[in-house]
Amino acid sequence: MTGNSTALASAPDTFPRLLLEHARVRPGRPALREKDLGIWQTRAWRDVATEVRRLAHGMAALGVAPGRHVAVIGENRPRLTMAMMATQCLRAIPVPLYQDAVAQEMVYVLQDAEVEVAFAENQEQVDKLLEIRAQCPALRHIVYDDPRGMRHYGDGALLDYAALLVRGDEHARDQPGGIEQAIAAADADEPAAMFYTSGTTGRPKGVVLTHRALIDRARAVERMERLTDREEVLAYLPPAWIGQNMFSYTQLLVTGFTVNHPESPETVSIDLRDIGPTYYFAPPRVLEGLLTQVSIRMEDAGRLKRTMFHHFMKVAKRVGPALLDGDKVSAGARLHYALGDLLVYGPLRNALGMSRVRVAYTAGEAIGPDLFVFYRSIGINLKQLYGSTETSVFVCVQPDGQVYDDTVGPPVDGVQIRVSEGGEVLVKSPGLFREYYRNPKATAEAFDEDGWYRTGDAGYLDERGHLKIIDRAKDVGRLADGSLFAPKFIENKLKFFPYVKEAVAFGAGRSEVCAFVNIDLEAVGNWAERRGLPYAGYTDLAAKPEVYELIAQCVAQVNADLADDPRLAASQVRRFLVLHKELDPDDDELTRTRKVRRGFIEQKYAALVDAMFAGRSRQRVETEVKFEDGRTGRISADVAISDAPAAPGAKLARAA
């Protein structure tokens, strides 16, 4: 015990000191890989440390000082990762921004954080920054990574990444040892990074996280999962999302494994198979997309292959999770599953790029039980975790052998959880954020009088000590007759079907539940083509009576599942419509992490919501949309509204 405590006490406690430690202990081990023009390029830890030092000197020459903020905008790229490291070497604070945000969305963050230097991945991001620079007077320098398309840009604020390294070499000659002094002077309780919340209910808030908070949570999970420097991770999600940042940045520097960067978002599935990650992280929407691809392939397969797939998937659901959990399974069932593994599960894992996955996590929002069970059934050790930006991600994690589809696991080492009288989950953790930047009122409101952080989630601890999350506390409601209404639970059940990309349920204070459905254009388009059903795009396909019949079958199955749950049987979907457009972050309908902004949607499409509850069969609607170049337009449609019969059980539940 004493030896372990001493080791922890002497371990590097800031990100720059962790970087130097890896360069010393494992100098030749791969730290960062990037696929460029089809070839994987590798940077060893010693090379990363050397380049980060040069980059930090260059940033110091630009005037980056302790406590200042540096914006980082783009996809996951090694140079942007090193820009964050270099920023921290100067005791400055990196602020990752979502690369798919339109220019005007960036204005508030750049103004609020008073960003003076921004790292941009490519021409697209540079153009956004130049467009809004007049609104951000503090922004003096824009450093770009990819020089393609930048040859004729003459703006004095622009600086090529390679040129910044040269400037760093000059600064190092003038001030040798300056970066090392800054690294040595840093304190673990200083801010390490600032992440802006998705802003589902208002302006985003800057969440200030310290070195100590982030590193503590990463070490807790490193011990729990026995992570080593031999793990392979694929960094393919936005670095501005705390989940991806924890896995591909914080845990990279804590554990010293290898992070791989795909060539582009379009090549992720190919690059996933190339790398074969051992440690994998995906939000439910990514897992839903992968399952949709599997479903499409199976529908296109021959009859024999489809029959074999469906047969062995039944075996998998019965046997697979038990095998993963180490439960007793009969010899006959093991043999049957082994045959399925040879013919179906193994090839399927390989096609998904998950043949080597040892630990896989899903988080970001609740995952549908059916989706969760599917992956575990085919032998992927998928586990749920629970956390948020304010908690440095890791609050609860499912341990091996204690994985249930209806919980997010027990508290991680060092975390305390209690549930308020109103049902809200409260947390104390070493990973809690320091403050909301320049927002003391919001910071104070985030904690109760005893110092517990208010998560905003409704849930409870079950008899096993595992946390069950019902929904966001503000979204959990009651129907007019007092029956429980948990919209996210219903939406997740709908999204398990490959034909449903997004769903939004309404019903709080109403006599019944109604829902919007976004179809998955690829899955439903494939379904339509195989049936010779022509269509001219999303809006046309969404309005087809045949598509409504297809979605009605999905809704009917969800209602049958809800009927089996006495608490939720009254929440069956009684009416639905297929929305005439895809929900889009650019239209403020989703956050940048693809979470539904239910309140905004209910207000924006009030005419459709009212028509559903009024029993109308059609409603004309006109919707404003934003294009990628910032222009706006309007889509008009005559949206059909369909009834969905309730499954037996709902009336009994209401009477009870």
Image (cartoon, helix red, strand yellow):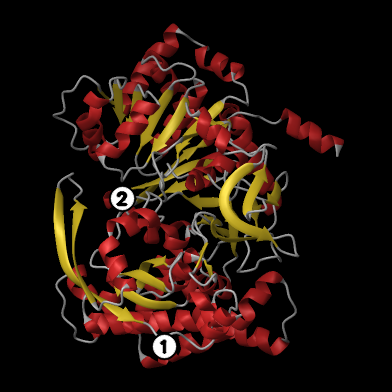
**Residue under the image location 34 percent in, 59 percent down:** 602
Instruction: Return the x and y of residue 298 as percentages of the image width and height.
Output: 38, 82
Instruction: Give the quarter of the figure containing the C terminus.
Output: bottom right
Instruction: Return the x and y of residue 505 as percentages of the image width and height.
Output: 41, 67
Instruction: Give the quarter of the figure containing the N terminus.
Output: top right
**Residue under the image location 59 percent in, 42 percent down:** 391
Nearest to the observer: residue 568 or residue 324: 568
Q: How many labels were placed on the picture?
A: 2
Nearest to the observer: residue 580 or residue 170: 580
Q: Compared to 557, does 87 lie above or below? A: above
Q: Where is mark 2, residue-wise? A: 588
Which class describes the residues within 10 Å of circle 1: few (<14), some (14-19), or many (20+)? some
Q: Compared to 273, does 144 lie above or below? A: above
Instruction: Return the x and y of residue 188 as percentages of the image width and height.
Output: 63, 26
**Residue under the image location 29 percent in, 26 percent down:** 142
569 sits left or right of 156 in the view: right
Where disc 1 sits, the SS reads: helix
Q: Where is mark 1, residue-wise? A: 306
Label 1, label 2: how many angstroms apart (C-alpha)?
40 Å
Q: Amino acid at mark 2?
A: Asp
Q: Compared to 264, does 26 lie above or below? A: above
Nearest to the observer: residue 432 or residue 18: 432
Mark nearest the camera among 1 and 2 is: 2
Nearest to the observer: residue 456 or residue 260: 456
Q: Amino acid at mark 1?
A: Arg
> Can residue 2 be seen at all in this image of the molecule?
yes
Which class describes the residues within 10 Å of circle 2: few (<14), some (14-19), or many (20+)? some
Pick whichever of labels 1 and 2 is earlier in the sequence.
1
In the image, farthest residue toward the right: 2
Q: Compared to 245, does 604 lie above or below? A: below
